[in-house]
Amino acid sequence: MILAMIAIMSAISFTQANAQSSYADLTALFEEWRDFEKPPLVDGAPDYSQHSMKAKHKGLKALQRKLAAIDTTGWSIEQKIDARLIMAEMNGLDFNIRILRPWARDPAFYKQVWTHKSDTPAHEGSINHALIELWAYEFPLSDDAAQKLTTEVKTVAPFLRNAREYLSGNARDLWMAGIYTMDQQIDVLETLAETAGNSNAELSRAIGEATEATKDFVAWLESEAPNKTGPSGVGKENYTWQLQNVHLVPLTWEDEVMLLTRELKRAHASLRLEEHRNQGLPEIPIVETPEEYEALALSSVDKYMAFLDDKDILTIKTYLKPALVEHIGAFVPADNRNFFAQATHREPMTLWTHFYHWWDLSRMEHEPHESSVRRGPLLYNIFDSRAEGVATAMEEMMLHAGLYDDNPRAREIVWIMQAQRAARGLASLYAHANEFTMKDASDFHVKWTPRGWMSPDLELLGFEQQLYLRKPGYGTSYVTGKHLVEELLADRARQVIEENGEEYTLSDFFAEMDDAGVIPVSLICWQLTGDDSMIGTLDGE
Protein backbone atom coordinates (compact mmCIF):
# COMPACT_ATOMS: atom_id res chain seq x y z
CA MET A 1 0.00 0.00 0.00
CA ILE A 2 2.79 2.40 0.96
CA LEU A 3 4.69 1.62 -2.24
CA ALA A 4 1.55 2.21 -4.29
CA MET A 5 1.02 5.58 -2.63
CA ILE A 6 4.65 6.53 -3.28
CA ALA A 7 4.22 5.58 -6.93
CA ILE A 8 1.07 7.66 -7.22
CA MET A 9 2.69 10.67 -5.54
CA SER A 10 5.74 10.35 -7.78
CA ALA A 11 3.50 10.27 -10.85
CA ILE A 12 1.67 13.37 -9.68
CA SER A 13 4.93 15.17 -8.98
CA PHE A 14 6.27 14.15 -12.40
CA THR A 15 3.10 15.45 -14.10
CA GLN A 16 3.23 18.72 -12.18
CA ALA A 17 6.89 19.19 -13.02
CA ASN A 18 6.23 18.57 -16.70
CA ALA A 19 3.27 20.94 -16.66
CA GLN A 20 5.39 23.63 -15.05
CA SER A 21 8.14 23.01 -17.59
CA SER A 22 5.60 23.36 -20.39
CA TYR A 23 4.38 26.64 -18.94
CA ALA A 24 7.98 27.86 -18.95
CA ASP A 25 7.98 26.96 -22.65
CA LEU A 26 4.90 29.13 -23.05
CA THR A 27 6.45 32.16 -21.39
CA ALA A 28 9.53 31.73 -23.55
CA LEU A 29 7.29 31.57 -26.62
CA PHE A 30 5.54 34.73 -25.43
CA GLU A 31 8.83 36.60 -25.40
CA GLU A 32 9.70 35.20 -28.83
CA TRP A 33 6.28 36.21 -30.16
CA ARG A 34 6.41 39.77 -28.83
CA ASP A 35 9.85 40.26 -30.38
CA PHE A 36 8.68 38.76 -33.67
CA GLU A 37 5.55 40.95 -33.80
CA LYS A 38 7.65 44.08 -34.37
CA PRO A 39 8.35 44.80 -38.04
CA PRO A 40 11.88 45.16 -39.42
CA LEU A 41 13.29 48.66 -39.88
CA VAL A 42 14.08 50.65 -43.01
CA ASP A 43 16.08 53.84 -42.40
CA GLY A 44 15.17 53.48 -38.74
CA ALA A 45 11.41 53.34 -39.46
CA PRO A 46 9.08 50.30 -39.43
CA ASP A 47 8.81 48.39 -42.69
CA TYR A 48 5.20 47.64 -43.67
CA SER A 49 5.91 46.83 -47.29
CA GLN A 50 4.01 44.06 -49.02
CA HIS A 51 7.14 41.91 -49.05
CA SER A 52 7.73 42.47 -45.33
CA MET A 53 4.14 41.66 -44.38
CA LYS A 54 4.12 38.52 -46.54
CA ALA A 55 7.24 37.29 -44.74
CA LYS A 56 5.69 38.26 -41.41
CA HIS A 57 2.58 36.21 -42.16
CA LYS A 58 4.68 33.16 -43.01
CA GLY A 59 6.63 33.48 -39.77
CA LEU A 60 3.39 33.95 -37.84
CA LYS A 61 2.04 30.62 -39.09
CA ALA A 62 5.16 28.91 -37.75
CA LEU A 63 4.69 30.51 -34.32
CA GLN A 64 1.01 29.55 -34.29
CA ARG A 65 1.97 25.94 -34.94
CA LYS A 66 4.53 26.15 -32.14
CA LEU A 67 1.86 27.43 -29.75
CA ALA A 68 -0.61 24.73 -30.80
CA ALA A 69 2.01 22.07 -30.10
CA ILE A 70 2.31 23.03 -26.43
CA ASP A 71 0.49 20.46 -24.33
CA THR A 72 -1.61 22.17 -21.64
CA THR A 73 -2.62 18.95 -19.87
CA GLY A 74 -2.41 19.44 -16.12
CA TRP A 75 -2.13 23.20 -16.33
CA SER A 76 -4.03 25.52 -14.01
CA ILE A 77 -6.85 27.60 -15.46
CA GLU A 78 -4.68 30.69 -15.09
CA GLN A 79 -1.93 29.12 -17.19
CA LYS A 80 -4.39 28.00 -19.86
CA ILE A 81 -5.74 31.54 -19.99
CA ASP A 82 -2.25 32.86 -20.67
CA ALA A 83 -1.98 30.47 -23.61
CA ARG A 84 -5.31 31.71 -24.89
CA LEU A 85 -4.15 35.32 -24.66
CA ILE A 86 -1.10 34.59 -26.78
CA MET A 87 -3.31 32.79 -29.29
CA ALA A 88 -5.61 35.84 -29.44
CA GLU A 89 -2.69 38.21 -30.03
CA MET A 90 -1.41 36.02 -32.85
CA ASN A 91 -4.91 36.03 -34.32
CA GLY A 92 -4.78 39.81 -34.11
CA LEU A 93 -1.71 40.02 -36.32
CA ASP A 94 -3.24 37.48 -38.68
CA PHE A 95 -6.38 39.63 -38.99
CA ASN A 96 -4.33 42.75 -39.55
CA ILE A 97 -2.36 41.15 -42.36
CA ARG A 98 -5.29 39.44 -44.07
CA ILE A 99 -8.14 41.91 -43.61
CA LEU A 100 -7.57 45.18 -41.78
CA ARG A 101 -4.21 46.10 -43.38
CA PRO A 102 -4.00 49.50 -41.65
CA TRP A 103 -0.63 50.25 -43.22
CA ALA A 104 -2.24 49.94 -46.67
CA ARG A 105 -5.75 51.35 -46.05
CA ASP A 106 -5.51 53.91 -43.26
CA PRO A 107 -3.35 57.07 -43.49
CA ALA A 108 -3.99 57.80 -39.79
CA PHE A 109 -1.91 54.68 -39.04
CA TYR A 110 1.14 56.83 -39.79
CA LYS A 111 0.51 59.30 -36.98
CA GLN A 112 3.57 59.09 -34.75
CA VAL A 113 3.46 62.07 -32.41
CA TRP A 114 1.07 61.69 -29.47
CA THR A 115 0.44 64.52 -27.02
CA HIS A 116 -1.72 62.62 -24.53
CA LYS A 117 -1.58 59.40 -22.56
CA SER A 118 -4.33 56.91 -23.32
CA ASP A 119 -6.67 55.97 -20.47
CA THR A 120 -6.45 52.33 -21.60
CA PRO A 121 -3.41 50.04 -21.29
CA ALA A 122 -2.33 50.96 -24.85
CA HIS A 123 -3.49 53.48 -27.43
CA GLU A 124 -6.95 52.83 -28.83
CA GLY A 125 -7.07 51.80 -32.48
CA SER A 126 -4.45 50.63 -34.94
CA ILE A 127 -1.04 52.13 -34.17
CA ASN A 128 2.37 51.83 -35.75
CA HIS A 129 5.54 50.64 -34.03
CA ALA A 130 7.34 54.01 -33.98
CA LEU A 131 5.20 56.16 -31.70
CA ILE A 132 6.62 59.31 -30.16
CA GLU A 133 4.98 59.73 -26.75
CA LEU A 134 5.49 63.47 -26.44
CA TRP A 135 3.34 63.61 -23.30
CA ALA A 136 5.99 61.58 -21.45
CA TYR A 137 8.69 64.27 -21.90
CA GLU A 138 9.29 67.11 -19.45
CA PHE A 139 10.36 70.50 -20.81
CA PRO A 140 12.91 71.95 -20.77
CA LEU A 141 14.53 68.73 -21.89
CA SER A 142 17.56 67.20 -20.27
CA ASP A 143 20.46 66.34 -22.60
CA ASP A 144 19.55 62.64 -22.56
CA ALA A 145 15.87 63.35 -23.20
CA ALA A 146 16.74 65.71 -26.06
CA GLN A 147 18.88 63.04 -27.67
CA LYS A 148 16.18 60.41 -27.26
CA LEU A 149 13.51 62.69 -28.74
CA THR A 150 15.81 63.66 -31.60
CA THR A 151 16.35 59.99 -32.50
CA GLU A 152 12.59 59.40 -32.47
CA VAL A 153 11.70 62.49 -34.51
CA LYS A 154 14.29 61.60 -37.14
CA THR A 155 12.19 58.54 -38.07
CA VAL A 156 9.21 60.65 -39.19
CA ALA A 157 10.57 61.72 -42.58
CA PRO A 158 11.69 58.27 -43.83
CA PHE A 159 8.53 56.67 -42.41
CA LEU A 160 6.27 59.03 -44.35
CA ARG A 161 8.31 58.69 -47.54
CA ASN A 162 7.91 54.92 -47.38
CA ALA A 163 4.22 55.26 -46.48
CA ARG A 164 3.48 56.39 -50.03
CA GLU A 165 4.56 52.95 -51.19
CA TYR A 166 2.73 51.10 -48.44
CA LEU A 167 -0.62 52.95 -48.78
CA SER A 168 -2.25 51.14 -51.67
CA GLY A 169 -5.81 50.71 -50.35
CA ASN A 170 -9.06 52.16 -51.64
CA ALA A 171 -10.97 52.87 -48.39
CA ARG A 172 -12.36 56.36 -48.98
CA ASP A 173 -13.67 57.25 -45.51
CA LEU A 174 -10.47 56.11 -43.82
CA TRP A 175 -8.43 58.03 -46.38
CA MET A 176 -10.34 61.29 -45.93
CA ALA A 177 -10.35 61.07 -42.13
CA GLY A 178 -6.64 60.23 -42.20
CA ILE A 179 -5.84 63.47 -44.00
CA TYR A 180 -7.27 65.41 -41.06
CA THR A 181 -5.34 63.29 -38.57
CA MET A 182 -2.03 63.81 -40.32
CA ASP A 183 -2.74 67.51 -40.71
CA GLN A 184 -3.03 67.69 -36.93
CA GLN A 185 0.48 66.25 -36.66
CA ILE A 186 1.76 69.34 -38.48
CA ASP A 187 0.28 71.56 -35.75
CA VAL A 188 1.77 69.36 -33.04
CA LEU A 189 5.24 69.48 -34.59
CA GLU A 190 5.10 73.24 -35.06
CA THR A 191 4.13 73.64 -31.41
CA LEU A 192 6.95 71.29 -30.42
CA ALA A 193 9.41 73.47 -32.34
CA GLU A 194 8.31 76.48 -30.30
CA THR A 195 8.39 74.55 -27.02
CA ALA A 196 11.83 73.02 -27.63
CA GLY A 197 13.24 76.32 -28.85
CA ASN A 198 16.78 76.52 -30.17
CA SER A 199 18.44 74.87 -27.20
CA ASN A 200 19.39 71.82 -29.28
CA ALA A 201 20.27 72.43 -32.93
CA GLU A 202 20.05 68.76 -33.91
CA LEU A 203 16.58 68.42 -32.42
CA SER A 204 15.44 71.63 -34.12
CA ARG A 205 16.59 70.32 -37.50
CA ALA A 206 14.87 66.98 -36.91
CA ILE A 207 11.60 68.71 -36.00
CA GLY A 208 11.84 70.90 -39.09
CA GLU A 209 12.43 67.91 -41.35
CA ALA A 210 9.56 65.99 -39.72
CA THR A 211 7.24 68.97 -40.17
CA GLU A 212 8.06 69.36 -43.86
CA ALA A 213 7.75 65.60 -44.42
CA THR A 214 4.29 65.61 -42.81
CA LYS A 215 3.21 68.57 -44.95
CA ASP A 216 4.40 66.77 -48.08
CA PHE A 217 2.60 63.63 -46.97
CA VAL A 218 -0.68 65.49 -46.39
CA ALA A 219 -0.37 67.10 -49.83
CA TRP A 220 0.16 63.67 -51.39
CA LEU A 221 -2.85 62.25 -49.53
CA GLU A 222 -4.98 65.11 -50.82
CA SER A 223 -3.80 64.56 -54.38
CA GLU A 224 -4.69 60.86 -54.16
CA ALA A 225 -8.06 61.38 -52.46
CA PRO A 226 -10.17 61.67 -55.66
CA ASN A 227 -9.05 58.16 -56.64
CA LYS A 228 -10.30 56.60 -53.39
CA THR A 229 -13.82 55.29 -53.91
CA GLY A 230 -14.10 52.01 -51.95
CA PRO A 231 -15.76 51.04 -48.65
CA SER A 232 -13.92 51.22 -45.34
CA GLY A 233 -15.80 48.63 -43.27
CA VAL A 234 -14.48 45.09 -42.94
CA GLY A 235 -17.87 43.43 -43.50
CA LYS A 236 -20.06 41.41 -41.12
CA GLU A 237 -18.24 38.08 -41.46
CA ASN A 238 -14.80 39.54 -40.87
CA TYR A 239 -16.12 41.67 -38.02
CA THR A 240 -17.49 38.59 -36.26
CA TRP A 241 -14.27 36.64 -36.82
CA GLN A 242 -12.16 39.33 -35.18
CA LEU A 243 -14.68 39.81 -32.37
CA GLN A 244 -14.60 36.13 -31.43
CA ASN A 245 -11.00 35.16 -32.24
CA VAL A 246 -9.08 38.30 -31.30
CA HIS A 247 -11.16 40.14 -28.69
CA LEU A 248 -12.65 36.88 -27.36
CA VAL A 249 -16.14 38.37 -27.21
CA PRO A 250 -18.69 35.53 -27.58
CA LEU A 251 -21.00 37.45 -29.92
CA THR A 252 -21.59 38.00 -33.63
CA TRP A 253 -22.17 41.19 -35.60
CA GLU A 254 -25.89 40.41 -35.49
CA ASP A 255 -25.79 39.79 -31.72
CA GLU A 256 -24.16 43.14 -31.15
CA VAL A 257 -26.73 44.95 -33.30
CA MET A 258 -29.51 43.43 -31.21
CA LEU A 259 -27.77 44.19 -27.91
CA LEU A 260 -26.84 47.79 -28.73
CA THR A 261 -30.29 48.53 -30.17
CA ARG A 262 -31.82 47.25 -26.94
CA GLU A 263 -29.41 49.28 -24.78
CA LEU A 264 -29.95 52.43 -26.82
CA LYS A 265 -33.72 52.26 -26.43
CA ARG A 266 -33.42 51.24 -22.75
CA ALA A 267 -31.25 54.29 -22.05
CA HIS A 268 -33.71 56.63 -23.73
CA ALA A 269 -36.68 55.07 -21.94
CA SER A 270 -34.85 55.24 -18.59
CA LEU A 271 -34.03 58.90 -19.20
CA ARG A 272 -37.72 59.63 -19.79
CA LEU A 273 -38.59 57.87 -16.53
CA GLU A 274 -35.93 59.77 -14.58
CA GLU A 275 -37.19 63.06 -16.01
CA HIS A 276 -40.75 62.15 -14.95
CA ARG A 277 -39.55 61.22 -11.49
CA ASN A 278 -37.64 64.49 -11.15
CA GLN A 279 -40.48 66.80 -12.21
CA GLY A 280 -40.38 69.99 -10.18
CA LEU A 281 -36.78 69.56 -9.05
CA PRO A 282 -34.33 72.34 -10.00
CA GLU A 283 -31.84 71.68 -12.77
CA ILE A 284 -28.25 70.96 -11.76
CA PRO A 285 -26.31 74.25 -11.73
CA ILE A 286 -23.51 74.53 -14.27
CA VAL A 287 -20.17 75.86 -13.00
CA GLU A 288 -19.24 79.19 -14.57
CA THR A 289 -15.63 79.83 -13.56
CA PRO A 290 -12.35 77.89 -13.39
CA GLU A 291 -12.35 78.27 -9.62
CA GLU A 292 -15.84 76.82 -9.32
CA TYR A 293 -14.90 73.91 -11.56
CA GLU A 294 -11.79 72.99 -9.58
CA ALA A 295 -13.63 73.17 -6.28
CA LEU A 296 -16.50 71.01 -7.58
CA ALA A 297 -14.17 68.50 -9.22
CA LEU A 298 -12.00 68.01 -6.14
CA SER A 299 -14.90 67.81 -3.70
CA SER A 300 -16.64 65.26 -5.95
CA VAL A 301 -13.52 63.08 -5.97
CA ASP A 302 -13.58 63.05 -2.16
CA LYS A 303 -17.29 62.28 -2.15
CA TYR A 304 -16.92 59.44 -4.64
CA MET A 305 -14.00 57.84 -2.80
CA ALA A 306 -15.86 58.04 0.52
CA PHE A 307 -18.94 56.44 -1.05
CA LEU A 308 -16.93 53.50 -2.42
CA ASP A 309 -15.31 52.97 0.97
CA ASP A 310 -18.40 53.42 3.14
CA LYS A 311 -20.54 51.12 0.98
CA ASP A 312 -17.84 48.41 0.77
CA ILE A 313 -17.79 48.64 -3.02
CA LEU A 314 -14.04 48.86 -3.51
CA THR A 315 -10.95 48.33 -1.39
CA ILE A 316 -9.36 51.76 -1.38
CA LYS A 317 -5.67 51.63 -2.30
CA THR A 318 -3.39 54.61 -1.72
CA TYR A 319 -2.88 55.20 -5.45
CA LEU A 320 -6.58 55.44 -6.37
CA LYS A 321 -7.38 58.99 -5.31
CA PRO A 322 -4.24 60.56 -6.85
CA ALA A 323 -5.06 58.82 -10.14
CA LEU A 324 -8.44 60.56 -10.20
CA VAL A 325 -7.18 63.94 -9.07
CA GLU A 326 -4.56 63.92 -11.81
CA HIS A 327 -7.27 63.67 -14.46
CA ILE A 328 -10.02 65.99 -13.25
CA GLY A 329 -9.37 68.30 -16.20
CA ALA A 330 -10.04 72.01 -16.26
CA PHE A 331 -12.84 74.48 -16.83
CA VAL A 332 -14.11 74.71 -20.40
CA PRO A 333 -16.09 77.73 -21.66
CA ALA A 334 -19.66 76.90 -22.65
CA ASP A 335 -19.07 77.34 -26.38
CA ASN A 336 -16.20 74.82 -26.39
CA ARG A 337 -17.60 72.01 -24.24
CA ASN A 338 -17.67 68.55 -25.75
CA PHE A 339 -20.02 65.78 -24.65
CA PHE A 340 -18.04 64.80 -21.56
CA ALA A 341 -17.49 68.38 -20.43
CA GLN A 342 -21.28 68.80 -20.44
CA ALA A 343 -21.34 66.13 -17.74
CA THR A 344 -18.35 67.24 -15.67
CA HIS A 345 -19.52 70.85 -15.49
CA ARG A 346 -22.76 69.63 -13.89
CA GLU A 347 -21.94 66.48 -11.86
CA PRO A 348 -18.33 65.29 -12.30
CA MET A 349 -18.91 61.98 -10.53
CA THR A 350 -20.84 60.77 -13.57
CA LEU A 351 -17.51 60.71 -15.39
CA TRP A 352 -15.33 59.77 -12.43
CA THR A 353 -17.15 56.41 -12.39
CA HIS A 354 -15.90 55.81 -15.94
CA PHE A 355 -12.39 56.69 -14.78
CA TYR A 356 -11.91 53.16 -13.49
CA HIS A 357 -9.55 53.32 -16.46
CA TRP A 358 -6.96 55.28 -14.52
CA TRP A 359 -7.20 52.87 -11.62
CA ASP A 360 -6.47 50.02 -14.02
CA LEU A 361 -3.32 51.79 -15.19
CA SER A 362 -2.23 52.66 -11.66
CA ARG A 363 -2.76 49.07 -10.57
CA MET A 364 -0.64 47.81 -13.46
CA GLU A 365 2.11 50.16 -12.29
CA HIS A 366 1.91 49.63 -8.54
CA GLU A 367 0.78 46.00 -8.43
CA PRO A 368 2.08 44.36 -11.61
CA HIS A 369 0.56 40.98 -12.41
CA GLU A 370 2.68 37.96 -11.59
CA SER A 371 2.12 36.59 -15.10
CA SER A 372 4.42 38.15 -17.69
CA VAL A 373 1.69 37.60 -20.29
CA ARG A 374 -0.77 39.79 -18.38
CA ARG A 375 1.67 42.29 -16.88
CA GLY A 376 1.70 44.78 -19.74
CA PRO A 377 -0.86 45.93 -22.32
CA LEU A 378 -2.30 43.24 -24.57
CA LEU A 379 -1.77 43.90 -28.27
CA TYR A 380 -4.51 44.82 -30.76
CA ASN A 381 -6.76 46.33 -28.06
CA ILE A 382 -7.70 42.86 -26.82
CA PHE A 383 -8.24 44.48 -23.42
CA ASP A 384 -11.24 46.50 -24.65
CA SER A 385 -14.14 44.40 -23.29
CA ARG A 386 -12.58 44.57 -19.81
CA ALA A 387 -11.20 48.13 -19.84
CA GLU A 388 -14.11 49.87 -21.56
CA GLY A 389 -16.71 47.40 -20.29
CA VAL A 390 -15.93 47.92 -16.61
CA ALA A 391 -15.62 51.69 -17.01
CA THR A 392 -19.03 51.86 -18.68
CA ALA A 393 -20.62 49.37 -16.29
CA MET A 394 -19.49 51.49 -13.32
CA GLU A 395 -21.57 54.41 -14.58
CA GLU A 396 -24.84 52.53 -14.17
CA MET A 397 -23.74 50.31 -11.29
CA MET A 398 -22.99 53.33 -9.10
CA LEU A 399 -26.36 54.86 -10.02
CA HIS A 400 -28.09 51.73 -8.73
CA ALA A 401 -25.78 51.57 -5.70
CA GLY A 402 -27.03 54.99 -4.56
CA LEU A 403 -24.26 57.41 -5.54
CA TYR A 404 -26.77 60.06 -6.66
CA ASP A 405 -29.47 59.57 -4.06
CA ASP A 406 -28.94 63.15 -2.87
CA ASN A 407 -28.82 64.51 -6.44
CA PRO A 408 -31.52 62.80 -8.51
CA ARG A 409 -30.97 64.97 -11.57
CA ALA A 410 -27.49 63.41 -11.92
CA ARG A 411 -29.19 60.11 -12.71
CA GLU A 412 -30.42 61.71 -15.93
CA ILE A 413 -26.80 62.39 -16.96
CA VAL A 414 -25.93 58.73 -16.49
CA TRP A 415 -28.65 57.68 -18.93
CA ILE A 416 -27.55 60.34 -21.42
CA MET A 417 -24.04 58.89 -21.28
CA GLN A 418 -25.34 55.35 -21.69
CA ALA A 419 -27.41 56.42 -24.70
CA GLN A 420 -24.43 58.12 -26.32
CA ARG A 421 -22.23 55.06 -25.93
CA ALA A 422 -24.90 52.80 -27.44
CA ALA A 423 -25.62 55.21 -30.30
CA ARG A 424 -22.01 55.55 -31.39
CA GLY A 425 -21.39 51.81 -31.09
CA LEU A 426 -24.48 50.88 -33.09
CA ALA A 427 -23.49 53.38 -35.77
CA SER A 428 -20.04 51.78 -35.98
CA LEU A 429 -21.62 48.37 -36.55
CA TYR A 430 -23.49 49.61 -39.59
CA ALA A 431 -20.34 51.36 -40.81
CA HIS A 432 -18.39 48.10 -40.68
CA ALA A 433 -21.21 46.35 -42.52
CA ASN A 434 -20.77 49.08 -45.17
CA GLU A 435 -24.40 50.05 -44.70
CA PHE A 436 -23.35 53.45 -43.29
CA THR A 437 -20.70 55.85 -44.49
CA MET A 438 -18.71 57.57 -41.77
CA LYS A 439 -20.97 60.60 -42.31
CA ASP A 440 -24.06 58.41 -41.84
CA ALA A 441 -22.57 56.96 -38.65
CA SER A 442 -21.83 60.45 -37.31
CA ASP A 443 -25.37 61.63 -38.11
CA PHE A 444 -26.85 58.61 -36.31
CA HIS A 445 -24.53 59.26 -33.36
CA VAL A 446 -25.77 62.86 -33.12
CA LYS A 447 -29.44 62.00 -33.63
CA TRP A 448 -29.58 59.45 -30.82
CA THR A 449 -27.53 61.36 -28.23
CA PRO A 450 -30.03 63.16 -25.96
CA ARG A 451 -30.29 66.92 -25.40
CA GLY A 452 -28.03 67.86 -28.30
CA TRP A 453 -24.89 67.10 -26.29
CA MET A 454 -23.28 65.58 -29.38
CA SER A 455 -23.40 68.09 -32.23
CA PRO A 456 -22.11 67.72 -35.81
CA ASP A 457 -19.38 70.32 -35.32
CA LEU A 458 -17.74 68.67 -32.30
CA GLU A 459 -14.22 67.39 -32.96
CA LEU A 460 -14.98 64.53 -30.55
CA LEU A 461 -17.64 63.21 -32.95
CA GLY A 462 -15.23 62.80 -35.85
CA PHE A 463 -12.54 61.36 -33.60
CA GLU A 464 -14.82 58.68 -32.18
CA GLN A 465 -16.33 57.51 -35.45
CA GLN A 466 -12.93 57.48 -37.13
CA LEU A 467 -11.47 55.41 -34.27
CA TYR A 468 -14.27 52.87 -34.43
CA LEU A 469 -13.97 52.57 -38.20
CA ARG A 470 -10.22 52.06 -37.83
CA LYS A 471 -10.61 49.38 -35.15
CA PRO A 472 -13.53 46.95 -35.62
CA GLY A 473 -15.18 46.06 -32.33
CA TYR A 474 -13.85 48.96 -30.30
CA GLY A 475 -16.90 51.18 -30.69
CA THR A 476 -19.17 48.49 -29.30
CA SER A 477 -16.83 47.29 -26.54
CA TYR A 478 -18.21 49.82 -24.04
CA VAL A 479 -21.70 48.33 -24.20
CA THR A 480 -20.88 44.69 -24.97
CA GLY A 481 -18.16 44.72 -22.32
CA LYS A 482 -20.64 46.17 -19.81
CA HIS A 483 -23.07 43.39 -20.73
CA LEU A 484 -20.40 40.73 -20.11
CA VAL A 485 -19.32 42.31 -16.81
CA GLU A 486 -22.91 42.32 -15.57
CA GLU A 487 -23.28 38.65 -16.57
CA LEU A 488 -20.06 37.86 -14.72
CA LEU A 489 -21.25 39.61 -11.54
CA ALA A 490 -24.55 37.72 -11.63
CA ASP A 491 -22.96 34.32 -12.30
CA ARG A 492 -20.12 34.68 -9.80
CA ALA A 493 -22.37 35.93 -6.99
CA ARG A 494 -24.83 33.10 -7.57
CA GLN A 495 -21.99 30.55 -7.60
CA VAL A 496 -20.43 31.73 -4.33
CA ILE A 497 -23.75 31.94 -2.53
CA GLU A 498 -24.97 28.53 -3.73
CA GLU A 499 -21.71 26.64 -3.25
CA ASN A 500 -20.41 28.24 -0.06
CA GLY A 501 -23.42 29.93 1.48
CA GLU A 502 -21.31 33.06 1.80
CA GLU A 503 -22.15 36.68 1.14
CA TYR A 504 -20.59 38.02 -2.07
CA THR A 505 -20.01 41.75 -1.90
CA LEU A 506 -19.15 44.20 -4.65
CA SER A 507 -15.71 44.62 -3.11
CA ASP A 508 -15.23 40.84 -3.44
CA PHE A 509 -16.20 41.06 -7.10
CA PHE A 510 -13.94 43.94 -8.01
CA ALA A 511 -11.01 42.44 -6.08
CA GLU A 512 -11.32 39.12 -7.94
CA MET A 513 -11.79 40.79 -11.28
CA ASP A 514 -8.85 43.16 -10.84
CA ASP A 515 -6.58 40.34 -9.67
CA ALA A 516 -7.18 38.58 -13.00
CA GLY A 517 -5.67 41.51 -14.91
CA VAL A 518 -6.94 43.68 -17.75
CA ILE A 519 -7.86 40.77 -20.00
CA PRO A 520 -11.06 39.87 -21.90
CA VAL A 521 -14.10 39.44 -19.66
CA SER A 522 -14.70 35.98 -21.14
CA LEU A 523 -11.35 34.85 -19.72
CA ILE A 524 -12.00 36.48 -16.35
CA CYS A 525 -15.25 34.51 -16.22
CA TRP A 526 -13.31 31.31 -16.87
CA GLN A 527 -10.82 32.10 -14.12
CA LEU A 528 -13.39 33.12 -11.51
CA THR A 529 -16.09 30.53 -12.16
CA GLY A 530 -14.27 27.69 -13.90
CA ASP A 531 -16.73 28.00 -16.79
CA ASP A 532 -15.04 28.45 -20.18
CA SER A 533 -18.24 28.33 -22.23
CA MET A 534 -17.82 31.94 -23.31
CA ILE A 535 -14.78 31.04 -25.36
CA GLY A 536 -14.80 27.26 -25.81
CA THR A 537 -11.77 25.11 -25.05
CA LEU A 538 -8.26 25.45 -26.36
CA ASP A 539 -7.28 23.33 -29.32
CA GLY A 540 -5.93 19.96 -28.27
CA GLU A 541 -7.75 19.73 -24.94
Image (spheres, rainbow, N blue to C red):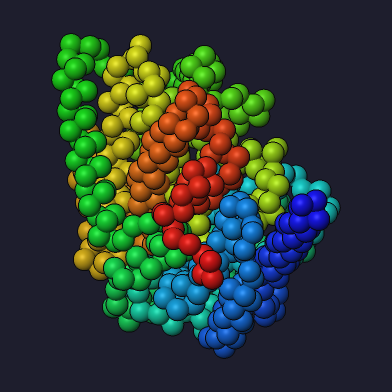
Q: Residue at coordinates 39% horizontally, 45% vertically from top-left?
A: 484
Q: Residue at x 81, y 55 (%)?
A: 3
Q: With respect to residue 317, does 449 lie above or below?
A: below
User: Can you name the residue that lies furthest to the bottom here?
Assistant: 51
In the rendering, at what x and y percent does residue 334 appear? 35, 30
From the viewer's perspective, tell me whether residue 121 is left or right of residue 372. Answer: left
Given residues 416 and 285, the one toward you in this image is: 416
- Tally the numbered discs: 0
Depth order, front residue of 172/299:
299
Would you say residue 10 is visible in this rendering? yes
Q: Is residue 53 above or below residue 268?
A: below
Is 184 rendered above or below residue 101?
above
Which residue is drawn at the image coordinates 64% and 38% (left, top)? Answer: 363
- Residue 181 position, x and y percent, is 45, 61
Residue 297 visible in image: no
Q: Position of residue 533 (x, y in %)?
A: 41, 54
Q: Residue furthest front?
A: 1
Q: Position of residue 387 (x, y in %)?
A: 49, 45
* Residue at 53% over, 29% down: 508
Image quadrant in which you'd find residue 338: top left
**In the rendered image, the vertical position of residue 541 relative to residue 302, given as above or below:** below
Which picture quadrant has residue 48? bottom right
Residue nearer the viewer, 336 or 409:
409
